[in-house]
Image (tube, grey):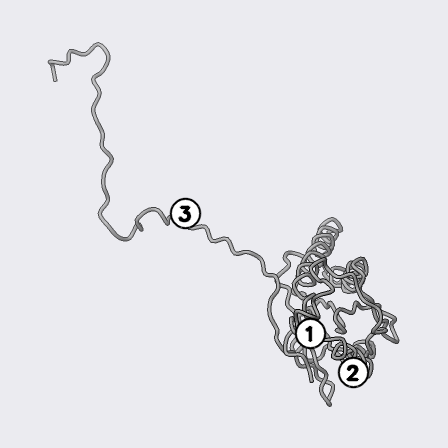
Amino acid sequence: MVSLSPAEALGAHAPGVRDLLVEVVRSRHDREAEAHLVKGSRYSMGFGSQWRDLLDDVQEALADRGFPSRRLAPAGYDLPVVNDSLIYVWRVPGTPDAVTRFASSPTRTNSFTAQPPDPMLFGLGFGNESESDDEASGEGEGAKVERLVRAVGDSMPVVLVMVHSSPRQLQSIEWAVAELDDVGDVKVYGQEAIWEPELVVADAASDGDSFDSGTPVPPAVELRPQEGADPDAR
């Protein structure tokens, strides 16, 4: 059964993974946008090639926290695995049905059949997990072993991280659980934005009346006597 959301797929690691993804993607976008500006190219093809760096940046960041990875054939991409879920970071092209056609290469297709790593490998996590987590969730040792054994025979859920960007702006970062159907189309579940730029609305006239309404009030003007003039002569 497919997970209904990235939070469900990633479990207790979801908040930490979310924050890390936003940090890594924003850092990569800033560097790529600056390089594009310095190069002064009229074309954005080079900017769009950041997709491989995005994959490597996220994999390395999660590997530093002790999470394993899974190598996908035939291209040999190493993708991070968190809570028996594969994380695939992808810069979405500006084409119709881009998400539906995500599995347009053998490597991407193989991401939906990837097997989890050795279940005895446990990641270091983000520092907010403890040995008592299983007890708190009500999962005993027997249930835990059963879950790990079951995971060995099943393919991993794919958490698809979708980056929408241009050389001018990082527009949004979304994630969802992706599933490949029988005809090769990709469907997503639990899609939500995990980062969007803050909108700053400045209304310069917010503290005053509109020019097309109200009654204008003239400023108070007091006549001052000229120097040397007789004040009684007025």
Q: Give the residue type that dot 1 points to.
A: Ala
Q: Give x and y (percent) for residue 37.
A: 71, 51
Can residue 105 be seen at all in this image of the molecule? no
Could you tell me the amino acid type at mark 3?
A: Ala
In terms of depth relative to the viewer, which is nearer, 199 or 113?
113
- Using the image as rendered, state which of residue 53 and residue 115 is in the foreground: 115
How busy is the neighbourhood of tag 2: few (under 14 within 10 Å), some, or many (20 plus)? few
Asked if the residue under mark 1 is in contact with the one under mark 3, i.e. CB atoms within 8 Å, the reply is no
Instruction: Locate residue 197, reporting x and y percent.
Output: 58, 57
Q: Position of residue 21 (x, y in %)?
A: 70, 61
Neighbourhood count class around disc 3 (C-alpha, 10 Å): few under 14, some 14–19, many 20 upward:
few
Task: Give the label on residue 204, or none.
Answer: 3
Element under disc 2? helix
Which mark is first along the chain, 2 or 3? 2
Instruction: Report how far apart the C-alphas of labels 3 and 1 lie in the structure.
Output: 46 Å
Q: Quadrant of residue 116?
A: bottom right
Relative image position of residue 27 (x, y in whole percent): 71, 54
Label 3, label 2: how far apart the Cα atoms are: 61 Å
What residue is drawn where x is 69% and y is 85%?
1
Query: Regarding mark 3 in the picture, which secondary structure is present there?
Result: loop
Labels 1 and 2 touching (C-beta < 8 A): no
Of circles 1 and 2, which is in front? 2
Query: Is 176 above or below relative to 187?
Result: above
Residue 42 appears in which quarter of the rendering? bottom right
Question: Is 161 placed above or below 61 here?
Answer: below
Q: Is residue 191 left or right of residue 120?
A: left
Q: Quadrant of the C terminus?
A: top left
Q: Which residue is mark 1?
A: 9
Name the residue: 15% across, 14% down.
Answer: 231
Residue matched to label 2: 150
